[in-house]
Image: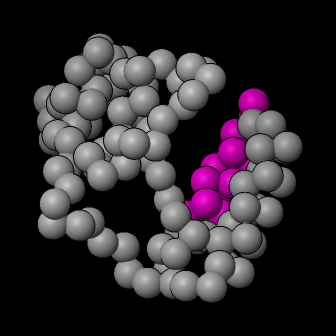
Amino acid sequence: MKHARSDYDPIQDPRGKIPHDEPVFLLRGQDRNAARAVRFYAGLVAADPQGDPRVVVAALRHADAMDAWRLHKAPDIPSTAKIVAPQKVFAANARAIPRTDSEA
């Protein structure tokens, strides 16, 4: 599991269901933007013809739990954390990532 931030590296998948080089993105309940981001994702899944309605329901419930979290603050990155360059995170899947016109 590849995190975008080095301070999240200790968060791993003990069952091995996520490939070691698969990128993941973690949103915490304390992030004041997280619930809205999860709701946006739920909307994308709902609009997807192959979207699973159970994913939508689970995401919306999780967003509600994030809203109920006791602490909300602006997202930050500790000064000791390293940001993993996207080219390193996605190197193994570079051919699968579509490029935008500005990147071509």
Residue 73: % across, % down: 44, 84
Residue 56: % across, % down: 77, 50
- What residue is at 71 percent from the left and 81 percent from the top? 68
Residue 31: % across, % down: 48, 74
Answer whether residue 47 is magenta in the image: yes
- What residue is at 72 percent from the left and 61 percent from the top? 62
Specify the quadrant that holds the N terminus: top left
Q: Which quarter of the figure has residue 65?
A: bottom right
The magenta segment is: 37-50
35, above or below 87, in the image: below
Give the dominant element type of the magenta stretch: helix, strand or loop. helix
**Residue in front for this viewpoint, 24 or 13:** 13
**Residue in front for this viewpoint, 86 or 72:** 72
- What residue is at 28 percent from the left and 26 percent from the top? 90
**Residue in front for this viewpoint, 65 or 50:** 65
The reply to whether residue 101 is in sight is: no
Q: State the count of labels.
A: 0
Q: Is residue 81 left or right of residue 7?
A: left
70, above or below 56, in the image: below
Answer whether residue 5 is magenta in the image: no
